[in-house]
Image (tube, rainbow, N blue to C red):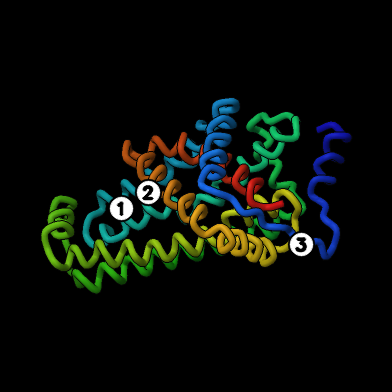
Amino acid sequence: MPAVEAKHIRNTRSKPDGQVDNIRSITLSDVFAALKKGASDFWERPSHYIFLVIIYPVVGFILAVWTAGGETFSLLYPIATGFALVGPIAGIGLYEISRRREQGLDDHPVYAFMVLRSPAIGAILALGLVLAIIFGLWLFAANSIYVFFFGENGPTNLPDLLAAVFTTSEGWGLLIWGNLVGLVFAFVVLATTVVAFPRLLDHGGSAADAVALSVRAVTHNLVPMLAWGLIVAVLLFIGSLPLFVGLAIVLPILGHATWHLYRAVVE
């Protein structure tokens, strides 16, 4: 990478000590504008092949759980919905591509790996570890709810599981409480990371400061941010329907859009 370009990148990531980021007020139109810009970034530089490499091993694991039967059925839905909890990690390289594109730099997908040389890589990895722990806690909570309603000897095949979920009081209880608890986990991830990862990539700093900034951004723009979270959940669900293949397009678009949402919210 040319020296002048490297210097440019370092300058964009420096921030005077004590300077506080200002949070802008945004509207729903800003949320959809960020999504539109994210789609534009993706079509300009498609990166779906990278996500296919990431997604297929995950899909293979899910299918292994699916075919294993027995108690592992209780983890099928939580694992599938867990994409929303670990999505910010998958999008970190896309933030770099969008950042480079808006600065007029080379935005080839290979530059997504430049995040590994970021001065904030330690904080990024620390925050990623926190998300991995949250994902593990979600699986534990989901399995506990399943055991509470169905006990240790629940349905052992998919048709029986679906029938039990939609035709019994225990199934409806599992469906309602499982999704409510899942929404709590999703909101925690949204509030703590929606601008945290882009902020670390953009200006460095500590993970704690980035999380605090993200929480301020969400609380200051609660309705638009909740709408963003709903959009993410719906698109991830749609992308998951054809054996998760659609996520190869949905995830990169959401990743690019998250960068533009960060730009809209943080001054």
Q: Could you say where residue 20 lies in the image, as x and y percent from the top left?
A: 76, 62
Q: Which residue is mark 1?
A: 65
- Looking at the picture, does residue 47 appear above or below residue 7? above
Q: Using a 10 Å C-alpha cutoff, classify the residue at mark 2 as few (fewer than 14 neighbours), some (14 to 19) or many (20 or more).
A: few
- Looking at the picture, does residue 24 appear above or below residue 52? below
Sequence-wise first label, 3 or 1: 3
Q: How far apart in space, not on screen, are marks 2 and 3 (Cα)?
A: 43 Å
- Looking at the picture, does residue 28 appear above or below residue 143? above
263 left or right, relative to 67: right
Quadrant in the picture for residue 76: bottom left
Q: Which mark is residue 61?
A: 2
Which type of secondary structure does the marked residue at label 2 adopt?
Answer: helix
- Asked if disc 1 and disc 2 are in contact, CB closer than 8 Å, the reply is yes
Name the residue rendered at 36%, 69% in the picture: 141
Q: Is residue 229 visible in the rendered structure shown here? A: yes
Q: Which residue is mark 3?
A: 20
Q: Could you say where residue 264 lies in the image, as x and y percent from the top left?
A: 64, 46
In this view, the residue in front, 159 or 191, is: 191
Q: Amino acid at mark 2?
A: Phe
229 left or right, relative to 62: right
Q: Could you say where residue 143 lies in the image, as x and y percent from the top left?
A: 31, 67
Q: Amino acid at mark 3?
A: Val
- Asked if disc 2 and disc 3 are in contact, CB closer than 8 Å, the reply is no
Q: Using a 10 Å C-alpha cutoff, classify the residue at mark 3 as few (fewer than 14 neighbours), some (14 to 19) or many (20 or more).
A: few
Q: How far apart in space, not on screen, are marks 1 and 2 (Cα)?
A: 6 Å
